[in-house]
Structures are given as C-alpha cells and as structure tokens.
Image: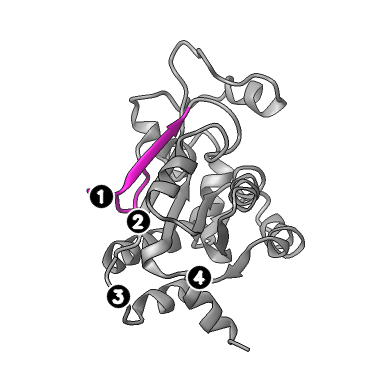
Amino acid sequence: MPSDAVRLGEQLDPASTVLLTVECQRGVVGPESALPELADTARRSGALANIARLVAAAHEAGVQVMHAVAERRPDGRGASRNARLFRAAEKLPVQQLAGSTAVHIADPVPVGEEDLVVRRLHGLSPVAGTEVDALLRNLGCRTLVVTGVSANVAIPNTVFDAVNLGYTAVVPADAIAGVPADYTPAMIRHTLALVATVTTTEGVLTSWRRPRRAR
C-alpha cells in the first residue's frame, strides 16, 4: 500500500494539478483590508507567506496557477444580496471594486505571466457559477490545490464544489486562514479532512521538488 507521501506525490503531478489562490487580494488580506482581523490572521499565522511560497514553487515546477478574485461593480449590478454576509460587505469602508487596487493580488504573492485570474461578481464560491470549472477541464486538471481565505466560507465552499465536480482537492492546512484563528484547525479537522487531502505547504513543496516529466 503506498505511503501518504507517495499518494500525495501522485495527486500533485504538475501535469494535472492547478494551484488556486482564493481572495488573496489587497482589499481582503492586504494592509488596507476591508476585513482587518482576517488580514492580520492571514499574515500572523504565516498563511499568506506560505501561499506566496506555493505560488513561486508552482511557477518553477510548471504547475498552473489560478487566482480567484471577488469583486463588485461600482453600481453593484449583479451582486448577491441574499445573505447577511453580502449586505454587511456593502457597508464596509473598503470595497472590492472592479479595476481598483483592492482587487489586485496582495504582496507577497507573485503573479506570473501564465497565471489565470478569474473574477466573480456574485456568490460565495470561486468555482460555482464561474468559468473556473471549464478552465480547469481545458487545462487537464485532476487535482486542485486550494489556498487562501477564508476558512469560514470561501475555502470550504471551494473544496466542496471541487469535489462535487470530480476533482481531487488538496488543502495545505498552513496556507489557509479564517477568523477566529482557532476556528481554522477545527474546521479542517472536522470538515475538510473528510473530503480533501490535508497536507502542509512543505508537503506540497517536497512533492514538486521531485523530478518529473515536463508539463
């Protein structure tokens, strides 16, 4: 029976893996975040730094990187308003307006020329109701590595949607963040571990360092 490391290595074949960053944008995890507690947690926990490491390693290993950004039009057309979260977001001092610096990918996460940036104007998930699924299939993706924020809503939503669509979800536990900080490990242990392969940033990096065929 293959070891966990071997199984993870098979799942993370660069030719069929996509690394997804979720809402790693300046208006969410940057210094002028609309959600300062979440931004602080993402930085203090090391999650944002680990995401940056994963993206850089993906670029080197030939793994496709995709950045999922949540934004809204200045006039709010098409935005969701059917949940408390959406209505609260409309009142925040920093808005994720299309074309603004708030929706740029936050430092220190690098963005490569071949990275795909997918923007959504509605909903809770970067997968459901967006072009992400079609892009993943066109890329030959079988495994989706999910990183970013928040562990409260968008990350579990992304993992569930990916699994329901037939992808293998891999979650580096130290590359996601939510609030309060102690909620994230509990959510991983009791929810994500049931449907995804939970690993660490180092586990993913080690797998991608192994010699493989070119993408």
- Bounds of the magenta segment: 105-120
For the residues labelled 2 and 1, the Cα–Cα distance comes to 8 Å
Query: Which numbered marker is on residue 213?
Result: 3
Is residue 77 positioned above or below 7 on the image? above
Residue flagged by tag 2: what amino acid is it?
Gln
- Residue sitting nearer the eye, 172 or 103: 172
Residue flagged by tag 4: what amino acid is it?
Gln
Q: Which residue is drawn at the image coordinates 59% and 29% (left, top)?
A: 123
- Mark 1, residues whose alpha carbon is within 10 Å: few (<14), some, or many (≥20)? few
Element on which disc 4 rests: helix
In percent of width and height, residue 95 lies at 47, 25
Q: Which residue is mark 2?
A: 64
Q: Quadrant of residue 88?
A: top right
Residue flagged by tag 1: what amino acid is it?
Glu
For the residues labelled 2 and 3, the Cα–Cα distance comes to 15 Å
Q: Nearer the viewer, mark 2 or mark 3?
A: 3
Q: Which residue is mark 4?
A: 11
Residue flagged by tag 3: what amino acid is it?
Arg
Q: Which residue is mark 1?
A: 114
